[in-house]
Every structure is written in C-alpha cells, then in structure tokens.
Amino acid sequence: MKVKNVLVTGEALFLQRHRFLFEELAQHVQTMGFLEREPAWYEASPIRKGIKAWYGLRLGSLQQAHAAFQKHPAGFRDRSQRLENRIYQLPAIPDLIFHVFATYRPFWYPAEIPYVLFLDFTSALSGHMWQPWAAAISPASRQGWLECEGATYTAAHHIFCTSTVVKQSLIEDYGQPDPKVTVVGAAGNFVNQPYTGEKNFGSQVLLFNGSDFERKGGDIVLAAFEKVRQALPNARLVIIGKKLDIAIDGVENPGSITDADRLISLFLNADLVLAPARCDPFAIFILDAMNYGVPCVIAKNPACGTADFVQDGVNGFVIDQDPLDPDTLARRVIQLLKSPEQLAEVSQAARETMKKTLSWQAIAAQMMQVLAALPEKAEI
C-alpha cells in the first residue's frame, strides 16, 4: 500500500512517550498529523473519583478500581465513537491511521480508512500474567472489554508489537493470523541518539526503577541488596521512579527523576541496572540504560518482553529462574560487581544493540517496509 498522509491517534501520554518513533516515521511520508484523545465527561476529577471509590468498595482495592475504570467496555465504545466523529470532521482525510495501543479504536463502525496498531501488551496477557491489570467490575464487563479489544485487532490493517510475547497472545488469545502481526521491538524514550561518550565501572552502584514497586520486583531487589551489602559494604542501591518509605543502609531513593541531565548522570554512575520484574510488557527503562552502556540483570520471565533483546553474557545478564529469588540475584550481582572487565565488554555490546537494532530509525524503516507490501484494503 502507498502511505503518504498519516494520522497518529492515541492517548496524549502515549503519543508523547513515542515521539521519537513518529519523528522517524515522518521522514517516510508526505504529511503526519496527530489527534490526541479528548477527555470524556466521566473523566472529570470529581466524577472519576466517585466512580473509582465505588469500584474500590466493590473490588476491595484502589489499584483494581483504577484498572476496572480504565477498562470498561462502555468507555471503550464511547472513546472509539468520539474519535471516529473527530476523524470525519477533519478537513483532509488521511490515507492511513497509526493508532497507539488498544484502549479504544479509531472507528467504532466499519470504515474505508485503514488503520494499523502499535501494541506493547494485551488484556488477555494481563489475565494470564498480572491480575491487577485484569480487574473488572464484573465478569460481563471483563468479557465485553476483551470482545471490544478483539474486534479492534480484527479490523486493523496490520499490527506492530514490541515483543514475541504480545504476538503469541494476538495469535492464541485473539485468533489473529501470524502474517498480520510484526514484532518490531522498541527503542529508548529518553533519548533518540546513541550515547557516544565514556562509561566507566567500579562504582558498585545498582540502579532500580521502582515506579511500580511490586510488579517490577522491588521486594526481590531490596532483599538481594542486603546480601550484596554484606559481601560488598561499599555497594549502593539507587531506587528511582517513586518516593518510598525505605530506611536501609546504602539505599538512596530520590523518587521521580524528570531532569534529563540528572538521569544521564545516574546511568553513567551505575554499574548495573536490576530489573527482576514479575511482569513488564516492554521495559523502556532497560533500553535507555543500555544506550548509556549500563548492563542490565533481568529474570527469564514469560511476562516480560525483555527476553527478546537481552542476551545473557552478551549485551546483558539473564537469570534463568522464574520466579527469581533474592539469593540467586545477590550471588549474580556480587560476581558481576567484582568483574568490571566483564561489565565493560557487555556495556559495549549493549550500546551496539541500541545503535544497530533497537533504534527508532531502524524500527520506522521496518514498519514502512511492511506497510509497502500490504494490500490497499485489509481482508477482514
């Protein structure tokens, strides 16, 4: 298919987060426009809080209430219809819509304008791998959402996804044909240019993204660090992403980091990034770390997409244990902190991976190649 005029749609947060991808895609087309979703009336603060409070009483958890609020089939339909109306009101109709994620779709009713999707997870995977994300106010609501999501995939002209985990879900859980789904990976959201400066080792500083502490394995990291500290008293652990109530010797918790220079400094000062997540669709934080040459330690976990690009002993370290226990993680970290030469070799390979394979430039080129080979109209 010929792609000239593209409209990118999705949540404002996701469009901003993937801005580097769109900058690269824009190099391949004549025009690229953006249509961020407008908030609905029920998302106004007082109404949203009231609904979530009621959901919380029903479900017994604010976290589950948030998931149930976000993934209600009525909301899916409303968001889709609102976007459809806005698209038809545009002065110039695009020849392709690039829609980010599947919390709604560009058209609720069948349309002539084709759309492709970019995904990093599915709701079915939530049910298999991380139940808090699969919470619903009722079984009927959960089923309704899955049906909305499935119809979105079926109507899509093509689906690009970040990992083989997502592709398998699309095939097995939603019945999508293999050729319709292309795994493209992702690149860093923090910077779009490869780091070319120096990266030294020997600080014995460990870095952990604790923005979603339990899901990302924060308890495993803390338990492992106490054992690391016994063997290496100068070791330090820096937990970013969220301010937590932690009082452990050697642990620093600056919270959310929004200053780019400060985050770069943290990467360059760290010997390792620890990422033993229980579930992580596609850990962009790991990609940003690899760009700055920080080797990452992950667990071999089917609920994480990182296994697609982190190769043990090559461009990172993979512990083949699920679930990962703190003792095993601690032993591996101690061994690595005592081997700065090995860290330096893996660091260079990580940087090469980001430069040659996991760059938005390479991903955009792959997407355009796939689109060029597609028929003008999808077979639904």
Image: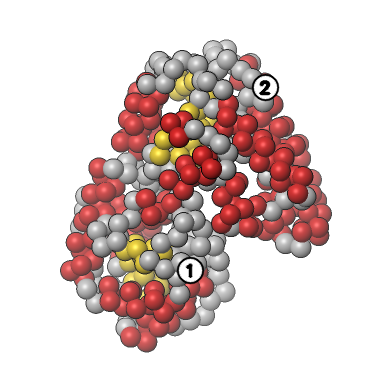
> Which mark, by number, is residue 109?
2
Report helix, strand or loop for mark 1: loop
Residue sitting at 33 percent across and 55 percent down? 310
Relative depth, front residue between 224 and 44? 224
- Viewer-proximal residue, 238 or 282? 282
Placement of the N terminus among the 4 image quadrants: top left
> Mark 2 or mark 1, which is nearer to you?
1
Callout 2 crowding tier (Cα within 10 Å): few <14, some 14–19, many ≥20:
few
Which residue lies at the image location 54% right of the left edge and 65% below the top edge?
Answer: 213
Q: CA distance from mark 2 to mark 1?
A: 43 Å
Relative to 153, say whether 234 is above or below: below
Q: Which mark is residue 323?
A: 1
Vertical comparison of 150 with 248: above or below: above
Q: Amino acid at mark 1?
A: Pro
Viewport quadrant of the C terminus = top right
Report the residue at 50% width, 25% height from top. Answer: 157
Q: Identify which residue, 212 or 133, lies in the foreground.
A: 133
Q: Residue at x 31, y 78 (%)?
A: 334
**Residue 337, image x and y in percent?**
27, 74
